[in-house]
Image (cartoon, rainbow, N blue to C red):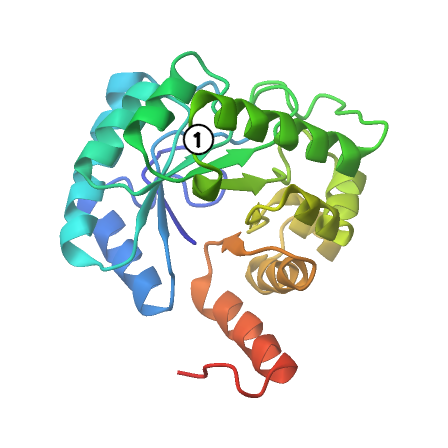
Amino acid sequence: MGVVNVTPDSFSDGGRYSELAHAVDRATELVSEGADIIDVGGESTRPRSTGTDVVEEIQRVVPLIKELVRRVSVPISIDTSKPEVMDAAVEAGAGLINDVCALKNDGALSAARDLGVPVCLMHMQGNPQSMQDSPYYDDVITEVREFLQQRVDTCLDAGIPRNQLLVDPGFGFGKNFNHNRSLILELDQLQALGLPITVGLSRKRFVGALLGDLSRDRSASSAGLALIAVQNGANVVRCHDVSVTRDLIRSWEVLQNPDHDRG
């Protein structure tokens, strides 16, 4: 899943793709590198972010989605928690909702059900403004799994088919270094949910902390962590650096199974 943020303030690429032409070029570049999904975001959810007005978010994402539907053959995901943005994005052609709030916002659950597209449910402790203020868990993997199971059950009760759900443990969303470390090492425990697992580790502070230098380029290490996540059960990796990430994962897959498609 290649990331295209049409925001002025996202933590990694804020402002780089706020112009439509630049965002389209970036998305088509990611597809040429092997992205299977393009994830479009119009609101930053970095720590301390304060949110974006609904109208502005729609104005950011809808023109890009419309253009990408014409230009690329892969599905387009909309990264939003607002039901109004979900409606507008799916009408424009988005085929997946990626919600960091797991459809907890007012109206989001019914909107997702009525739109009938797959949904990725993410775990977050707190909200972007406060989520990194001393996050605490007795057992992070158990608590994340239980939260996701509860949200899955809520979606099923609301009428969203099970085969349209994905789950995401939410690396960096209300987690400190040790929480993130435990989650990636024990990611296989989320397989008990019986749903595809999405992970987003790309370029996050956790990656810089692992390198011991927050100023270092995080691309290669992010790709390595994506590979570890796949080895531990992840099905979708959300990343900024598609080419190196795909090459690492494909190389490992071929080593595991020489008959794996190498096309």
**In the picture, residue 134 is in which quadrant?**
top right
Which residue corresponds to mark 1? 44
Q: Quadrant of the C terminus?
A: bottom left
Residue 101 in view = no
Q: What amino acid type is highlighted by mark number 1?
A: Ser
Residue 171 in view = yes
Image position of 262 (left or right of 188): left
In this orientation, which residue lies closer to the viewer: 149 or 90?
A: 149
**In the picture, residue 179 is in which quadrant?**
top right
Q: Residue at x 62, y 64 (%)?
A: 227
Q: Quadrant of the N terminus?
A: bottom left
Q: Residues within 10 Å of mark 1 (few under 14, many from 20)?
A: many
Is residue 194 shown above or below 147?
A: below
Residue lying furthest top: 106
Image position of 156 (left or right of 37): right
Percent x, y for residue 4? 36, 47
Percent x, y for residue 183? 74, 45
Is residue 94 shown above or below 46?
A: below
In this orientation, which residue lies closer to the viewer: 172 or 184?
A: 184
